[in-house]
């Protein structure tokens, strides 16, 4: 099952990877400013059911604010801090917390709250139209939430397993072909239309299919 690749150790390894991959020029990558708006998605699970939705985070020199919107529910206001030296961002509100790091115009990290534990991934954008958000599910040997944020040919997001465990998704497009990786597995697919994606995933001996649509409900 995919949950096997989403243990605390896997999340710790992901955190180490984010820290080590930080561009030497500082947060934001390439020497650019990390300040601005980040649009993306999250996935979380309590071990019996998975949930997901969208997240918008605005980073300023004085801190960070945001809105977490679980699928089908009202948005939840978040407030928090930004460390310009490390690129670390922390937000909380309504019993939900996000902790992440800005690297190369992405702000990614972990989620904890009433929905359980999980991951989130965002892209920096001048406006919400710069980043398309795809929300969906996966099935097969495991089932759960499969959400992606797309800007240009870059993809980032999160999956969350109904049975427990969540991890970051990263990938890219070449034409309409999609390639994705996550801790312990890979996925492939295609951008069927401007607003729909579909594909397959593999994690060890397990496999299945996934699909997503934009905009997120």
Image (spheres, rainbow, N blue to C red):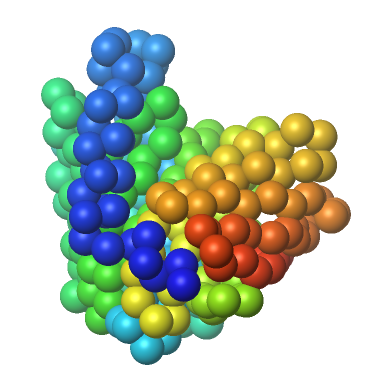
Q: Residue furthest bottom?
A: 48
The residue sitting at 36% across, 41% down in the picture is 107
- Residue 60 at x, y percent in the picture: 27, 35
Left or right: residue 134 versus residue 123 is: right
Q: Nearer the viewer, residue 28 or 116?
A: 116
Give the quarter of the image for residue 136: bottom right
Q: Residue furthest front?
A: 205
User: Is residue 63 visible in the rendered structure shown here?
Assistant: no
The residue sitting at 40% across, 13% down in the picture is 30
Instruction: Say if 80 sits above or below 34 in the image.
Output: below
Left or right: residue 35 versus residue 204 is: left
- Residue 18 at x, y percent in the picture: 30, 35
- Residue 199 at x, y percent in the picture: 73, 59
Give the quarter of the image for residue 98: bottom left
The residue sitting at 46% across, 67% down in the picture is 2
Q: Which quarter of the image is occupied by the C terminus?
A: bottom right
- Residue 5 at x, y percent in the picture: 37, 60
């Amino acid at each position: 099952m995919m949950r096997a690749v989403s243990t605390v150790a896997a999340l710790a390894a992901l955190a180490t990877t984010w820290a080590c991959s930080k561009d030497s020029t500082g947060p934001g990558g390439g020497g650019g400013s990390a300040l601005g708006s980040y649009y993306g998605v999250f996935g979380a699970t309590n071990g019996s059911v998975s949930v997901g939705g969208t997240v918008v985070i605005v980073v300023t020199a004085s801190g960070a604010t945001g809105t977490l919107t679980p699928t089908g529910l009202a948005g939840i206001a978040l407030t928090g801090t930004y460390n310009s030296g490390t690129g670390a961002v922390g937000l909380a509100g309504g019993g939900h917390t996000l902790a992440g790091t800005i690297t190369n115009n992405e702000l990614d990290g972990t989620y904890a709250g009433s929905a359980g534990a999980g991951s989130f991934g965002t892209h920096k954008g001048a406006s919400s139209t710069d980043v398309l958000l795809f929300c969906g599910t996966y099935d097969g040997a495991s089932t759960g939430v499969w959400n992606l944020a797309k800007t240009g040919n870059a993809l980032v997001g999160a999956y969350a397993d109904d049975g427990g465990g969540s991890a970051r998704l990263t990938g890219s497009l070449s034409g309409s072909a999609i390639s994705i990786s996550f801790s312990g597995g890979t996925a492939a697919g295609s951008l069927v239309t401007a607003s729909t994606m579909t594909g397959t995933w593999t994690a060890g001996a397990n496999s299945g299919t996934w699909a997503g649509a934009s905009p997120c409900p």
